[in-house]
Amino acid sequence: MRENLRSAIASGRFRSSDRLNDRGSDVAELFGIDSLDLVELVMAFENNGLKLNTIDDLMRSMDQVKAK
């Protein structure tokens, strides 16, 4: 998932400053999940104290999870 998102940013499909509220369905499509799964993913991060507003927030959160 992280690499797909990195590639989409590198290709210009997404900008790191894009808001998840605005681009959520596109991010879900990129990940091969539906929008409800994306909401559940965001909620799981937020339940662990990570606030996700932008694509960059999502990237940093995934990096933190991978580092653990």
Image: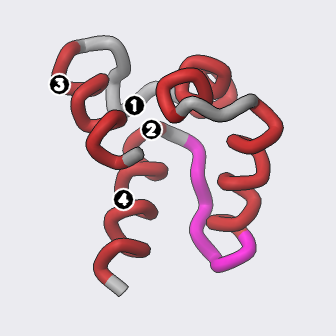
Give me the C-alpha separation between circle 1 and circle 4.
12 Å
> Are discs 2 and 1 less than 8 Å apart at CB?
yes
Quadrant, the N terminus: top left
Q: Secondary structure at mark 1?
A: loop
Instruction: Identify the residue under disc 4.
Output: 60
For badge 4, the amino acid type reads Arg
Give me the C-alpha separation between circle 1 and circle 3.
13 Å
- Image-quadrant location for residue 34: top right
Q: Earlier in the sequence, mark 3 or mark 4?
A: 3
Quadrant, the C terminus: bottom left
For badge 3, the amino acid type reads Ala
- The one nearer the camera, 5 or 18, is 5
Q: In the shown orientation, is residue 14 left or right of residue 10?
A: right
Q: Position of residue 12 (x, y in %)?
A: 24, 13
Instruction: Identify the residue under disc 3.
Output: 10
Q: In the shown orientation, is residue 23 left or right of residue 35?
A: left
Q: Residue at x 74, y 74 (%)?
A: 47
Give me the C-alpha separation between circle 2 and circle 3.
13 Å
Q: Residue at x 75, y 43 (%)?
A: 37
For badge 1, the amino acid type reads Ser
How crowded pointer 4 is (Cα within 10 Å; few <14, some 14-19, many 20+) is rated as some
Q: Secondary structure at mark 2?
A: helix
Q: Nearer the viewer, mark 1 or mark 3?
A: 3
Instruction: Identify the residue under disc 1.
Output: 17
Q: Nearer the viewer, mark 1 or mark 4?
A: 4
Q: Secondary structure at mark 4?
A: helix
Give me the C-alpha separation between circle 4 and circle 2.
9 Å
Q: Which span is picked out in magenta?
A: 47-53
How crowded pointer 2 is (Cα within 10 Å; few <14, some 14-19, many 20+) is rated as many
